[in-house]
Image (cartoon, rainbow, N blue to C red):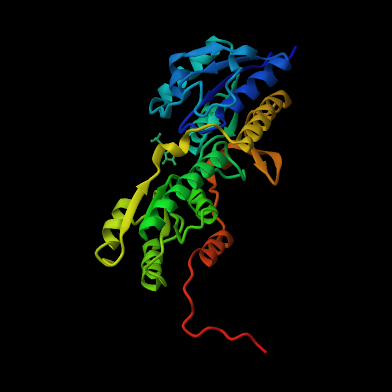
Amino acid sequence: MAQKIVIGVLTSGGDAPGMNAAIRAVTRAALNKGLEVWGIYRGYQGMIEGDCKKLCSEDVSGKIQHGGTFLQSARSAEFKTVEGRSKAHDSIVKHGINSLVVIGGDGSFAGATQFAYEYPDISVIGIPGTIDNDIYGTDYTIGYDTALNTVITAVDKIRDTASSFNRIFLVEVMGREAGFIAVNSGIASGAEVIMVPERKNQIEKVRKFLKQRARKNKSSIIIVAEGLEEGSAMEIAEKIRPEFPQFDIKVSVLGYIQRGGSPSSKDRVISSLMGVAAVEALLEGQRSLMIGYKNEEIVHVPLNKTVKLHKTISDELLNVAELIGTYAPPKDPVEPKP
Ligand code: F6P
């Protein structure tokens, strides 16, 4: 007789709006298919410490509308060690857990891949959850859509005060070493310049823009992705202020508000699809893969590929951002052909 599937579900790394919807979907789909499911608290650290609870349908009621993760999260240094992973294995096996659903980002997937390799008795399915949207093999990660909308709302508000004073604002957004939040929020909020960590010498773009700035009596928004080689928004402002004393340059770091808030409909729906797909993958006998979402469809991606390969930002998107961001009238206007 086939072994009964007993799932342990956890959230790891940076929390992201929509994680609760994914936990709920994993739980409900598992229970409706006759499987057992355990919630593991505080990510891999809770797994090591045996901090878990068998979930029933009511445990995931009233959670879908909340940001954060009700299972809580952690960045576990201990799980990076052989001993830590061994403890984690022993502690889940004690509860009969033979399948793991890990909702997290690339750091969490690196741990998951290593764990699946070391412990072939445990099947591991990853669900991409990070506001950064920087995971290979999926167009979309849980939380990205909500975070993007949070940034756009904040930048719209900053624009109101910026234009009341003709100020230049450097707005720093999250994304670790990835510029997905920066470029798309920049396009959507009409930013004049967008600085992304994937390209070199981004500060030159700012200098060029400020030199060409057509009208002094106009506000400007410069989106600064964290993780730039030139430093933080604050450091960039300190470099450029003395070069452009004619401008009033301010900095606003959006920080952790980008991670919170009620998930958007897109985040709730795609998280739900991914949660169900994770349970179905386990029923199919899959044992080391990530559930992705590409071209509006669920896809399966080998877990180790998501760790080895990097998702890149497209040149086309960056070109669009540059083309519509700044307006510097040409010295000799091109005359329309008769
Ligand atoms: O991975 C998501 C993210 O929000 C990054 O954009 C950011 O750099 C990082 O987490 C900060 O996370 P923490 O301070 O929780 O470690």
x and y, in percent, of residue 150 in the image: 50, 41
Q: Quadrant of ligand 1?
A: top left
The residue at the point 43 percent across, 15 percent down is 49
The residue at the point 57 percent across, 45 percent down is 136
Quadrant in which the C terminus appears: bottom right
| 86 in relation to 216, above or below | above
Residue 31 seen in render: yes
| 26 in relation to 171, above or below | above
Quadrant in which the N terminus appears: top right
Q: In which image quadrant can residue 241 be found?
A: bottom left
- Residue lying at the far right in this picture: please name it: 1
The residue at the point 46 percent across, 20 percent down is 86
Residue sitting nearer the eye, 115 or 133: 133
| 128 in relation to 177, above or below | above
x and y, in percent, of residue 20 in the image: 56, 26
x and y, in percent, of residue 41 in the image: 48, 18
Q: In which image quadrant can residue 303 be found?
A: top right
Residue sitting nearer the eye, 230 or 84: 230
- Residue lying at the far left in this picture: please name it: 242
Residue 123 seen in render: no
- Residue lying at the far front in this picture: please name it: 164
Numbered circles on residues, count: 0
x and y, in percent, of residue 213 in the image: 40, 70
Residue sitting nearer the eye, 208 or 261: 261
